[in-house]
Image (cartoon, rainbow, N blue to C red):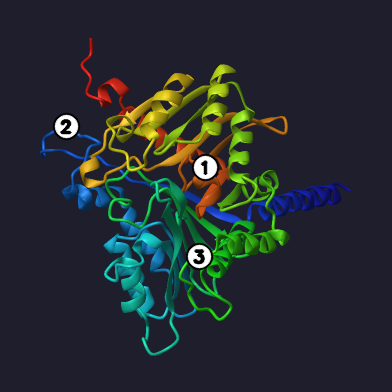
Amino acid sequence: MRLKSKGIVLLSFLFQTLTLSVSVAGVVDWDLMHTRPECKTSPDGPVRTFCMDTDRKEMAKLSGMEDKVKAMIEQAKDSTAKIYIAYFSFSNFAAFDALCAAGKRGVQIEGYFDTDYKADQNNNPNRLQNQCQQDPQAPKNVKIFFLGEKKKNPDGSLLVWRLHHNKFLIVDPGPNENNVNLNFSSGNLSASGLSIHFDHWAKLVVSKDSNIFKIHQCVLQGLRAAITNTDGETLPTDRPEVYKAIMQTCLQTLDTNVESAIASEGIAPLFAPNANNEIYRALKTTIDSVVKGGKIYGAIQHFLHLGIKGDLARAVQRGVEVRLIMDDDVILGSSEVPGVGDFYQSQLKPSGIKIQFLQTNASVMQMMHNKFLIFEKARVQGVLQNRVFSGAGHFTTSAMKNNYENFYLTQNATLTAKYQDLFNYMWPRSVSEQVASGKPTN
């Protein structure tokens, strides 16, 4: 009887272990890497966040991000492997060299970028397609597409402003491997995004049968259909309505419920364009769930969303500590997005949110380019949890609804802790508005 009891206990333990492993098998590994803009005007000078163009190489080496991206790309060995890249821009030569080498060895590469970069045949996306095929005479193994549209009314007001602003890299080593590298980031595959910007990349290893990987496959299917016809020919302009229709059909068999996805894999992916404002609704629900005594903190480059501002201000009023890091371009008038300075002065500054700034060099397009929020003590289904909202998009209505964007709501403890470390790296390097604006102290 005693042996039988021990056997039952052992079987019970194994069953529980197996059940746990199945529930978390979707994401096999979680990691986060980020840039480290620690620049000096002289070898023995003070470390500053303000960097020069000549600092790119040294800062890329300091963070090691270029080497890590190249190492991921090099896992695609031959024509059985696939690489999917989706970014606003792509100007990083180290990443280009690795991708070009992959294309020449027959790896299937599919890339999506913003239409602003379509006309220049010498930029990296076009060069990748035109110069890096395994065999120019054979069916193309490198395919590049451009999405997005910008139009203005005669009076100069915006008529259409739709960006391809996704930021993810997927490396599938081939059919003999069960897992793929799935990476999403605040930064582009740009010269600055892996060096002097403040940017981060989440590095996930996921199984091919995972919900998150299958949802990204739906996204790729939608992007492909939006810019090509039924014969596979590239269209002059993308069709966001086709993207949304494809996504709606493709996602029907997958888990798109935020809480269910988080419960099963620790992460819920969210994509724009969408018809139901689902990204903002998921973010609002999370902000509203943080209880008195909890904390919300993170880094946002461009903030123009009245709804999110109101949600954060109400969190402050109910006793939540809210801290944000922004780029000093917001208060110096050098931001690339019109209106963010006025929004800060009229909406954010009086909201009760504590805001500090990172001093960056607008003359060389250096930016505080992160976009993430960390939530401590979010009450979900009666349980206090820590979560992170992050991704490619800024806090604007266009990012949440109209652009091609990827966002993620994450509850995984490992990744959440790494985001907390990232904020703790940035906050001591940030300064007050008074210091950032150069105003004299009294």
Q: Nearer the viewer, mark 1 or mark 2?
A: 1
Identify which residue, 146 or 79, lies in the foreground: 146
Q: Which residue is mark 1?
A: 397
Q: Which residue is mark 2?
A: 46
Amino acid under disc 2:
Pro
- Residue furthest to the bottom: 137
Amino acid under disc 3:
Asp
Quarter assignment of residue 425: top left
Disc 1: CA contacts within 10 A as few (<14), some (14-19) or many (>=20): some
Q: Callout 3: helix, strand or loop?
A: loop
Residue 109, compared with residue 150, is above or below; it is: below
Disc 2: CA contacts within 10 A as few (<14), some (14-19) or many (>=20): few
Mark 1 and mark 2: Cα distance apart in space:
39 Å
- Residue 131 position, x and y percent, is 31, 78
Q: Earlier in the sequence, mark 2 or mark 3?
A: 2
Amino acid under disc 1:
Thr
Q: Nearer the viewer, mark 2 or mark 3?
A: 3
Taking the spot 22% from the left edge, 23% from the top edge, the residue there is 438
Q: How many callouts does the rendering have?
A: 3
Taking the spot 42% from the left edge, 37% from the top edge, the residue there is 300
- Residue 182 position, x and y percent, is 50, 59
- Residue 200 position, x and y percent, is 40, 46
- Residue 254 position, x and y percent, is 69, 58
Mark 2 and mark 3: Cα distance apart in space:
48 Å
Q: Earlier in the sequence, mark 1 or mark 3?
A: 3
- Residue furthest to the top: 442
Numbered badge on residue 238: 3
Q: Are marks 1 and 3 in contact (CB under 8 Å)?
A: no
Mark 1 and mark 3: Cα distance apart in space:
20 Å
